[in-house]
Amino acid sequence: MNDRTTPNTPPSTSTTAEASEETRGRILEAASQRFTQFGYNKTTMAEIAKDCDMSAANLYRFFKNKLDIGANLANSCLGAELDLIKSIVQKKQRPASDRLHDVVLQILNYVHGLWANDPRMNEMVNAICEARMDIVDQYKLTQHDLIVELLEDGVKRGEFSIDDVPDTAGAIISAITAFSMPLLMPLYTYDTFEKRAKSVVRLLLTGLMKR
């Protein structure tokens, strides 16, 4: 019989990382709920920590400050939107014109559904845009690259006639900005936005289609 005891082994790095990510996710969820209920400006780190059953000191191990939490939430929302755009752009079995239509309408559907009924979350968006323009700039850059990919495919297929694809992509993004700005979502009903988005897409395609 072997009487030797098994030595205690420290948790693996992967296990520790998973636990850390789980805690971060719990903090972000608690913060999101509090921002929605009470507003970004009126929420404190101490309140978020209390909602997570942890000390404020422990909370600061995961996030530097409230802005850091808000930035992570904003990144998550913007990342999901970009993933949606990418999934549409890469369905290359479909005409580029149909994909451009779907990109604009799905952006509107996503942004309106997420922000129209959450004016307090718009408060967070405004704060993030003012303090972390790097997040907004990276989102715009990735969005532009995806639209460029779509337009280039349309040109390759013979659907579009475009002299300067990057410049045209920038013009398209400017034209559809109203459908992707959270701060504008409470101004109109979804039906009103959808009608305008479809009109803008028709106008864009009139200018893009090869004659």
Image (cartoon, rainbow, N blue to C red):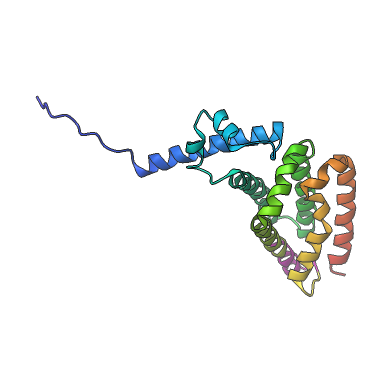
**Quarter of the figure that contains the N terminus:** top left
The answer to which image quadrant residue 110 occupies is top right
Which residue does the image show at 83% across and 41% down from the upper left? 186
| Residue occupying the far left of the picture | 1
Residue 209 visible to an observer of this rendering: no
| Residue occupying the far top of the picture | 1
Residue 99 visible to an observer of this rendering: yes
Question: Is 183 covered by the magenta stretch?
Answer: no
Question: Is 152 covered by the magenta stretch?
Answer: yes
The answer to which image quadrant residue 122 occupies is top right
Dominant SS of magenta comes to helix
Left or right of 16: which side holds 204? Answer: right
Which residue does the image show at 55% across and 36% down from the upper left? 27
> Which region of the structure is painted magenta?
149-160
Give the x, y percent position of residue 118: 76, 36
Tell which of 76 and 207 is nearer to you: 76
Tell which of 160 and 116 is nearer to you: 116
| Residue occupying the far bottom of the picture | 163
Give the x, y percent position of residue 208: 84, 66
Q: How many marks?
A: 0
Give the x, y percent position of residue 209: 84, 65
**Position of 211 relative to 93 (above/below):** below
**Quarter of the figure that contains the C terminus:** bottom right
Which residue does the image show at 11% across and 26% down from the upper left? 3
Left or right of 98: which side holds 33? Answer: left
Tell which of 180 and 207 is nearer to you: 180
The answer to which image quadrant residue 133 occupies is bottom right
**Position of 47 relative to 203 (above/below):** above
